[in-house]
Image: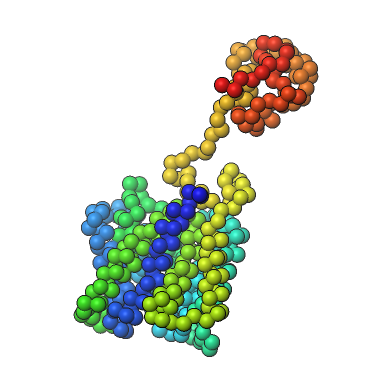
Amino acid sequence: MDRRWPDILLTAAAPTAWGTTYLVTSELLPPDRPLWSGAIRALPAGLLLLALTRRRPRGAWWWRAAVLGALNIGAFFPLLFLAAYHLPGGTAAVLGATQPLLVAGLTVLALHERPHPRALAAALAALAGVALVVLRPGAGLDPTGVAAGLTATAAMGTGLVLTRRWGRPPGVGTLTATGWQLTAGGLMVVPAALLVEGMPPVPDAPALAGYAWLTLAGTALAYALWFRGAARLPVTQVSLLGALSPLTAVALGWAVLGQALTGWQLVGFAVAVGATVAGQLPSRRPGPAGRSRGQSPVRQSRGQGPVRQSRGPAWRGTTASMRRGPGANSPAAASGRVKRASAAGPAAYDSRSIQRASSAVQPSPGRPAISRTRRSATRVSSS
């Protein structure tokens, strides 16, 4: 199995947890308090992670953490709720499904990485599948809602790309960096919630359970996994996993609330899931750095250097001339090598072809190896 799949599955858990927000909000939380719901999700989760990690930003990471917190939390939450108020049905979810295409463009500009065509095709297919699942006939396109939805998508997409570009300070873990962003973003949402919705609601027992779920699983753990995936996987593929959020919401509505699914919705569901999975598959064609184009280059940042070929007998045979001494490069020695090579054939003289051969393959009988001391063919030992 590809070593990236554990990272992919862990990252996919984040949008799956976000997909439970719709069910928890409608069934457990106080109505008409979306901004306070966002603030209560982000700020306590950030403070909890700060208390566990006990590490503050230093230097440039004060403003970087503030920028990332504003993009991923502080601006995203209010704009998303504004879009939900002005757009009927699942139009806001469709706007959110455009994030992989936006991230692909930002990746080229900010990271100088060209997304694989398969990932772009999967992003288009996932967008079409999500539209089939969540859109309803007669869904309106309010200009304010569309602008808010696209801006929210652009904010989180930019935050995802900057998370990959800036990485983390040396010695700082994912939980610490996530705590910085959640705290900064939560502090930005609180003033907007006070201005628009007034004082925070007094929660009852179901609301406390809902806030606990959204704070711990839907925010602290989910964002930690999301940022972890952004540091390890290609950002276009990470953003493509965001389609799992509206799909999870629809699946929970069918399983828990008894909401019916039409045939077209089932088709769209299958298309979106299939496109999300296909977008994670690596390319088999080698890229310029000796890896597949669909593979993340982050392996080098994790301390893994290039893979070296094993030095078997074929390798030792090619380095024999290096052990002959200082006179090996003299004109007389060069002339002697040319004569021996002409007697043995061009294949024995072509050292580049020998270097490309695997050390585990024995020489064919028609192309014998040449001993360093004799002209006669010798057998290469397999030891």
- Quadrant of the snapshot with the C terminus: top right
Can residue 85 be seen from the camera position used here?
A: yes
Q: Residue at x 73, y 13 (%)?
A: 376
Q: Residue at x 33, y 50 (%)?
A: 172
The quadrant where residue 338 appears: top right
| Left or right of 192 in this view: 258 | right
The image shows residue 249 at horizontal and vertical percentages of: 42, 74
The image shows residue 278 at horizontal and vertical percentages of: 56, 61
Pick the front one: 29 or 35: 29
Is residue 330 depicted above or below 112 in this figure?
A: above
Pick the front one: 347 or 379: 379
Can residue 163 be seen from the camera position used here?
A: no
Q: Residue at x 49, y 80 (%)?
A: 261
Is residue 51 depicted above or below 340 in this figure?
A: below
Is residue 137 depicted above or below 225 in this figure?
A: below
Q: Going by the picture, which residue comes out furthest to the bottom? A: 138
The colour scheme used to paint the residues is rainbow
| Left or right of 42 in this view: 276 | right
The quadrant where residue 108 appears: bottom right
The image shows residue 330 at horizontal and vertical percentages of: 68, 13
| Left or right of 338 in this view: 86 | left
Q: How many marks?
A: 0
The image shows residue 9 at horizontal and vertical percentages of: 44, 58
| Left or right of 311 in this view: 85 | left
Q: Residue at x 79, y 17 (%)?
A: 343
Is residue 375 depicted above or below 120 in this figure?
A: above
